[in-house]
Amino acid sequence: MSNETKSESITAGMVNELRKKTGAGLMDCKTALIEANGSLDEAETILKKKGIASAAKKATREAAEGTIQAYIHGGGRVGVMLELNCETDFVAKNDDFKQLAKDICMHIAAASPLYVSREDVPEELVEKEKDVASAQAEGKPAQAIEKIVEGKLNKWYGQICLVEQEYIKDTSKKIQDVLTDAVAKMGENIVVSRFERYQIGE
């Protein structure tokens, strides 16, 4: 089947349905559907792969616009302030961007991360954690110890670093996946710059 014939078999309804599911542009949706021979699921996978690749490129661009989002939970017992950055004022005012900031605030309130990413964790804390993990693996072969320590560190980072935590609204994703999806959808670099979490009595 030629591309022209394939194109004719793709209806506006199919394109709109894919657009609703992915947030991608009309032409991107149509191209993906043609490539997938009209299969919505396959077209969604194609768009996701392209989006992740394009998100990786955008990650190097400066994100100097954005929003400060506040969230109060549990009758005033827990509060979160978050700075979420993007590239333009246009995206900063976008409802999807604002909703993303709210969702991440709610996640921080529930999951209590201490740092944005592993790069923010003080080196002395990392060394302490390594020492604890090494002591627990004592007596095992050297290669095994190295793997055990690496595994324990990754698990620890997954508990304390926001971008490595499982997303409370969808545990099949990490917060970094949520950000990558948003970059692919909104077409700009989006980063969590900083946050503060307050809890009564802490």
Image (cartoon, helix red, strand yellow):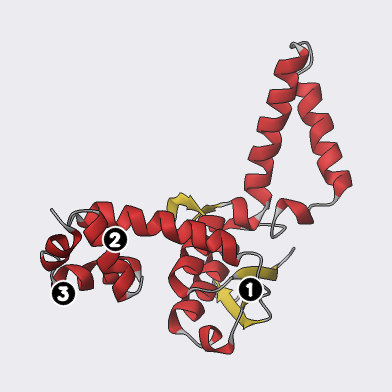
Q: Quadrant of residue 66?
A: bottom right
Q: Amino acid at mark 2?
A: Ala
Residue 55 position in % (x across, y down): 53, 62
| Disc 2 to disc 3, C-alpha distance | 13 Å
- Graded by Cα atoms within 10 Å as few (under 14), some (14 to 19) or many (20 or more), the crowding at tag 1 reads many
Q: Quadrant of residue 127?
A: top right
2 vs 1, front mark = 2
Mark sitting earlier along the chain (2/3)? 3
Residue 12 position in % (x across, y down): 16, 74
Q: SS of the residue at dot 1?
A: strand
Q: Amino acid at mark 3?
A: Ala
Q: Is residue 199 visible?
A: no
Mark 3, residue position: 12
Q: Say if mark 2 contacts mark 1, CB within 8 Å.
A: no
Q: SS of the residue at dot 3?
A: helix
Residue 5 position in % (x across, y down): 12, 62
Residue depicted at 46% across the width and 62% down the height: 181
- Graded by Cα atoms within 10 Å as few (under 14), some (14 to 19) or many (20 or more), the crowding at tag 3 reads few
Mark 2, residue position: 32
Residue 102 position in % (x across, y down): 52, 75
